[in-house]
Image (cartoon, coloured by chain):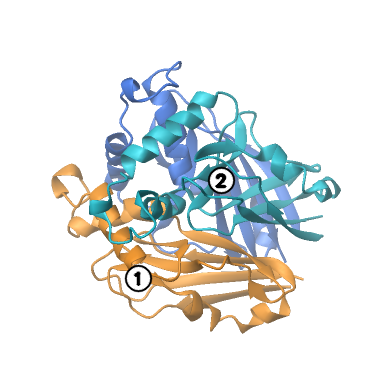
Chain colours: A orange, B cyan, C blue
Amino acid sequence: MWHQTTIRLSSKSRGYHIITDEVLQQIPEIKQINTGIAHIFIQHTSASLTINENADPSVRRDFLTHFKRMVPEDTSMYEHTLEGPDDMTSHIKSSLLGSSLSIPITNGELNLGTWQGIYLCEHRNHGGRRRLVVTLHGE
Amino acid sequence: MWHQTTIRLSSKSRGYHIITDEVLQQIPEIKQINTGIAHIFIQHTSASLTINENADPSVRRDFLTHFKRMVPEDTSMYEHTLEGPDDMTSHIKSSLLGSSLSIPITNGELNLGTWQGIYLCEHRNHGGRRRLVVTLHGE
Amino acid sequence: MWHQTTIRLSSKSRGYHIITDEVLQQIPEIKQINTGIAHIFIQHTSASLTINENADPSVRRDFLTHFKRMVPEDTSMYEHTLEGPDDMTSHIKSSLLGSSLSIPITNGELNLGTWQGIYLCEHRNHGGRRRLVVTLHGE
């Protein structure tokens, strides 16, 4: 069985946001899959997807702090600065964290570890609503 | 054909470890697949999976050195410090390196390049036994 | 339907190169797939694949500048230096950016966002022709 759908997320502020439930609400078809893979793909180059800790909000705040330090918003370091200091840095962070996730499906559910959640990493100051293509496949 | 299994790795010290053989020993079913994909997923947020050089151990030591420098263990930089300086830094490294791998299967084997091996990246000082979900799929 | 093929890219200079068309030319079979996944895997540990902005060449130049800064080519920081300052740094960048991509297929095409392209990230000064294994799967 294959199922593919496009999801538009609600608009998020700059930062790291858990979207596990927002995604799952759009793919009830997952319950029909016993063994398979869920593939989630973001159609943008200035926001990304990752899996990380789903409990303590300080983890997401520390992600924001760390990536600001590791990819400094100093326009003198970049050529591509037309849209401001959060433009090129967002492209770099997108590739560091990645544009897709593949997660095992087991007995109709995402087989995540106890502490794992799906993050939308919004790197732009005003990113707007982001579009995901979700592909479920299994038996 | 779909095959899915959960693997518990042996406990590893902090650092970068080649686990290609340890994983392959648990999935003899791969021999039945002519063309397909092996998906390996780690159910943790403080250890990760990557593919890199499988020969010279100095590469794995240099990974450890580099990531300590790039993600400094300085608790004054983070809020999430309850479990010590290797806590938040492990979450960040996990997302930088990623929680899953997809590898082509060709003629019953992982179709890795000559110098490629699967690394478990253990970011915690005492991470314990890590759990992987391996999903094989192909024809 | 499964389709798997090995592609040898033309030799690229050190830097970030859009290879979307070069890959698509080798996989006309994608047109037969209505819903599926394209998996692209690089069989090397000193070059990587990522998805990023497909329009302005300054983005790719800024990638080069940023990664040189973030992973400094200073051999005093590494043990594994036999092949020069671009050796160990290439291994690290490969794992940061990743060795494979999974992209949804929709109506016979890669379902990329408007601004997305596939990058070959050539981290070596003289990397030569790189080998990709492309696996298409869908219905």
Secondary structure at numbered mark 2: helix
Disc 2 designates what residue? C23
Relative image position of residue A28 (x, y in whole percent): 62, 83
Image quadrant of residue B3?
Answer: bottom right
Q: Which residue lies furthest to the left in this view?
A: A76
Secondary structure at numbered mark 1: helix
In terms of depth relative to the viewer, which is nearer, C135 or B131?
Answer: B131
Residue C53 visible in image? no
Q: Residue at x 43, y 67 (%)?
A: A119
Q: Which mark is residue A57?
A: 1
Assess disc 1: are there few (<14), some (14-19) or many (≥20) residues with their C-alpha within 10 Å of its C-alpha. some
Residue B36 visible in image? yes
Of the 4 image quadrants, the one containing the C terminus of chain B is: bottom right
Label 2 is placed on what type of residue?
Answer: Val
Relative image position of residue A73 (x, y in whole percent): 19, 52
Do marks 1 and 2 share a chain? no
In terms of depth relative to the viewer, which is nearer, B111 or A118?
Answer: A118
Q: Mark 2 lies on which chain?
A: C
Image quadrant of residue C106?
Answer: bottom right
Q: Residue at x 32, y 41 (%)?
A: B70
In terms of depth relative to the viewer, which is nearer, C88 or C122?
Answer: C88
